Amino acid sequence: MNRGRCQGPRFFVFNVTGGIVWATLYASAAYGLGTRVHALAGPVGFASLLLAAAFLVWLFLYMRLHEARLEQEAEQVVPQGVV
């Protein structure tokens, strides 16, 4: 990773571009769905909740199963620990 160069302007351009693309897609989907968006909001919200819960369970299990290896890798990166 090159920390010597200033990455601020490049990040800003990509961040603004991503925000514009996201907002355009979101607005287009809302316009296209019209009043049907309320009918989809419930099932989509519930599915999102289930996916988030499943991801958190997976992450917890992954961390438990690989805790020793992850600690060892962290020690190699930051041998003195975080102050």
Image (cartoon, rainbow, N blue to C red):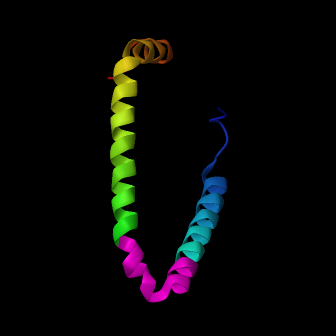
Residue 5 to residue 25: above or below: above
- Relative placement, left or right, of 78 versus 46 is right
The verdict on residue 31 being magenta is yes
- Relative placement, left or right, of 28 versus 58 is right
Q: Position of residue 56 (x, y in %)?
A: 34, 40
- Residue 81 is at least partly visible in this image: no
Count of numbered circles on the image: 0
Q: Where is residue 67 in the image (x, y as percent from the top left)?
A: 37, 17
Residue at 37% of width from left, 66% of height from top?
43
The verdict on residue 14 being magenta is no
Residue at 38% of width from left, 78% of height from top?
39
- Residue 7 is at least partly visible in this image: yes
Check the image and name the residue furthest to the bottom: 35
Q: Which of 12 and 60 is in front in this view?
A: 60
Q: What residue span does the magenta drawing correspond to?
A: 27-41
Quadrant of the drawing holding the N terminus: top right
- Relative placement, left or right, of 75 versus 46 is right
Q: Which of 38 and 30 is in front in this view?
A: 38
Residue 67 to residue 26: above or below: above
Q: Where is residue 77 in the image (x, y as percent from the top left)?
A: 50, 17
Q: What type of secondary structure mainly makes up the magenta span? A: helix
Quadrant of the drawing holding the C terminus: top left
Locate residue 47: give its quadrant: bottom left
Q: Position of residue 10 (x, y in %)?
A: 67, 54
Residue at 56% of width from left, 84% of height from top?
32
Locate residue 74: give its quadrant: top left
